[in-house]
Amino acid sequence: MDSSGHHESQGPVASQDGGNGRTSVMQPYLFPYLGYFQLFRATDVFVALDDAAFIKKGWVNRNRILLQGEPYTFTVPIQKQSQHVSIHASLIAPDDGWRNKLVVTLTHAYRKAPHFETVMPLIQRVLQGDPATMDRMALDSIHAVLEYVGMQPNIKCSSAMDIDPALSGQDRILAICGSLGTKTYVNPKGGRELYDPTRFQQQGIDLRFIHMGEVTYIQGGGKPFQPALSIIDVLMWNSKEDVLGFMDDFTLEP
């Protein structure tokens, strides 16, 4: 990290003390926004909280793109299910044409973008793949983007970890960090009110919040910039090098 607090290396932060230096934990989202990917630049280990409850109208199976100059929400349909079903047990709905419809929508939205020919095949491979559950498609989308920009992250799934299923919220995060030997836990700034720094200090963990810089870029169409869209929008309008630069535009704060 430089004097301004920005992370400079082109890969995960390396631990210097034999433990897992930095950890972040998030639900797996479908082609998430830029700030989500900054967590991979800021940490050694990313834990996908795939055993969390699936939240209807959350970001696990949907996101926003720019369509005709305005934000447009696209969705991967989920089979009908009861409440409190976990993300990794949430089944993707049978293909009644929704995959092709989504590809057509994305093509219409970005066919004039400078990196469409390179990025669209990546998106199609994810959307037209055949995972049974939503966690797999979301993770496929994350892996595809990271591979595209040349990153090899260390991603673990919470469902594969030996964590007490009765734990939730902060207690669950602390248990995950404890099992990994985490020295620093990094969370998006929006979750500041969810955590008590003293609890983390008692476990020998430094709690940090990631703040994304003021990232803007030309989106086409001449309209005002629309922030916090899916990473799809960032990839379509920017080179790999610029995308990596955006991913590194953050600070870590107490």
Image (cartoon, grey):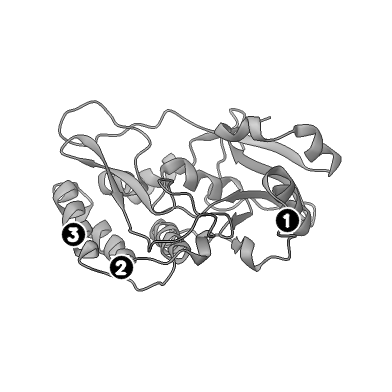
Secondary structure at badge 2 equals: helix
In the visual, does 85 lie left or right of 130? Answer: right
- Residue 235 place in picture, x, y as percent: 31, 49
Q: Is residue 203 above or below residue 190?
A: below
- Residue 208 place in picture, x, y as percent: 67, 36
Secondary structure at badge 3 equals: helix
Residue drawn at x 51%, y 66% as measured from the top left: 89
For the residue pair 28 and 182, the one nearer the viewer reads as 28
Q: Earlier in the sequence, mark 3 or mark 1?
A: 3
Secondary structure at badge 1 equals: loop
**Residue type highlighted by circle 2:** Arg
Residue drawn at x 34%, y 31% as measured from the top left: 216
**Residue type highlighted by circle 1:** Ala
For the residue pair 45 and 82, the one nearer the viewer reads as 82
Q: Which mark is residue 125?
A: 2
Q: Is residue 32 above or below residue 209?
A: below
Of badges 3 and 1, the one in the foreground is 1
User: Which residue lies most toward the right here?
Assistant: 202
Q: Residue tagged by mark 1?
A: 166
- Residue 192 place in picture, x, y as percent: 63, 31
Contact, mark 3 vs mark 1 (Cβ under 8 Å)? no
The image quarter in which residue 184 lies:
top right
Q: Measure the C-alpha gap from mark 3 to mark 1.
A: 40 Å
Of badges 2 and 1, the one in the foreground is 1
Q: Measure the C-alpha gap from mark 2 to mark 1.
A: 37 Å
In the visual, does 253 lie left or right of 141? Answer: right
Q: Residue tagged by mark 3?
A: 101
